[in-house]
Amino acid sequence: MANIKKLTSVTAFSTGEGKRISGTYSVMTESGDLVDSNVRFNFIALNEELLTHIEALEDHAQSKIEGE
């Protein structure tokens, strides 16, 4: 029986190296028992497709705050 990893947060932000993605996730069994929580990860986004998606999210968020 394999464990399930459930994403609990994700953030994209600019650093000196480029766009950094960081987040957390929980690990649980298929029956719902919690194995681990608040497991952290981060990486620099280098893939052009991923960078395009990040830009689209940032553009959408910017349009939301400009529309207020």
Image (cartoon, helix red, strand yellow):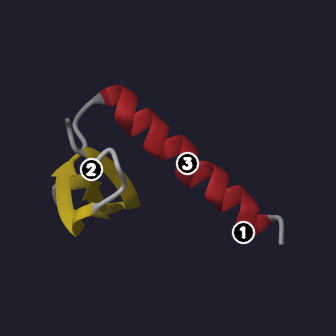
Report the residue marked by disc 3: 57
Residue type of the residue flagged with mark 2 = Thr
Query: How would you rate the neighbour count of disc 1 (Cα within 10 Å): few for under 14, some for 14-19, many for 20 or more?
Result: few
Mark 3 or mark 2: whose residue is earlier in sequence? 2
Q: Secondary structure at mark 1?
A: helix
| Residues at marks 3 and 2, CA–CA distance in whole angstroms | 32 Å
Mark 2 or mark 1: whose residue is earlier in sequence? 2
Q: Secondary structure at mark 2?
A: loop
Give the image location of residue 20, x and y in percent: 26, 56
Query: How would you rate the neighbour count of disc 3 (Cα within 10 Å): few for under 14, some for 14-19, many for 20 or more?
Result: few
Where is 6 relative to 22, above or below? Answer: above
**On the rendered structure, is 67 left or right of 45?**
right
What is the quadrant of residue 63 in the picture? bottom right
Report the residue marked by disc 1: 65
Identify the image quadrant of the N terminus. top left
Residue furthest out toward the front:
31
Viewer-side residue, 17 vs 32 = 32
| Residues at marks 2 and 1, CA–CA distance in whole angstroms | 40 Å
